[in-house]
Image (cartoon, rainbow, N blue to C red):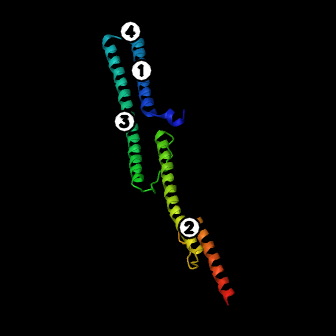
Amino acid sequence: MSAVTKRSGSYGRTLGVGAVLVLVLATLAVVNVYTNLAPEMSGSQQSMLLSGLVSILLIVAVALLFVATIIGRERTAAVETLAAQARQIEQGELDVDLATNRTDDVGDIYRALAVLRDSEQLDRQHGVSAEVVAQYCETAVEISNGNDDSRLEENVDDPQLAELAMRFNEILDQRKRDAEIDSR
């Protein structure tokens, strides 16, 4: 099982289990304090002790709720940002910055989306290269049919194809110069 799968849903589960565990421990501590101290106190003191302990328990519960809200908002904001970036990529904007330092499942999604984006960029680049290669093939056919003035397009995005075109055109130019010298 991959790390991504193992972490799936980890925030909610971990936060929920952690909150329940803290509340259970706090409740046990309150019960322990009350049962140990209450027998030695008068009725009004017991009432005050119980009131104070319940207040502490409520403060712990509110603090846990506050922490859960902050974590939830942060996670929601991260997912909303990620969704917006995914929509940009879907619309063809491939220059979206997907760099992240996150090591959680949201970070995994960022990295996966970056791989998809990069794959799309490569597909587009290869699509352009395929068009250029097709054009080069047509030019080669023209040259083989005797059109010595045909040249390969050197101004292309793919540097390797541009280099190929430049060298090929140099060969054709040299061949043309040699033919002119031979014809004199």
Q: Earlier in the sequence, mark 4 or mark 3?
A: 4
* Amino acid on which disc 4 is placed: Pro
Q: Nearer the viewer, mark 2 or mark 4?
A: 2
Work out whether residue 9 can be spotted: yes
Element at badge 1?
A: helix
| Above or below for 94 versus 167 | above
In the displayed structure image, the side of residue 28 where residue 132 appears, left or right: right
Q: Give how far across and how far down residue 2 sits, in percent.
A: 54, 35
Element at badge 4?
A: helix
Q: Nearer the viewer, mark 4 or mark 1?
A: 1
Q: Nearer the viewer, residue 79 or 40?
A: 79
Element at badge 3?
A: helix
Element at badge 2?
A: helix
Work out whether residue 157 can be spotted: no
Q: Which residue is mark 4?
A: 39
Task: Name the residue furthest front.
Answer: 145
Q: Which residue is mark 3?
A: 69
Task: Indicate the quadrant where residue 175 lies.
Answer: bottom right
Q: Which residue is mark 2?
A: 137
Q: Nearer the viewer, mark 3 or mark 2?
A: 2
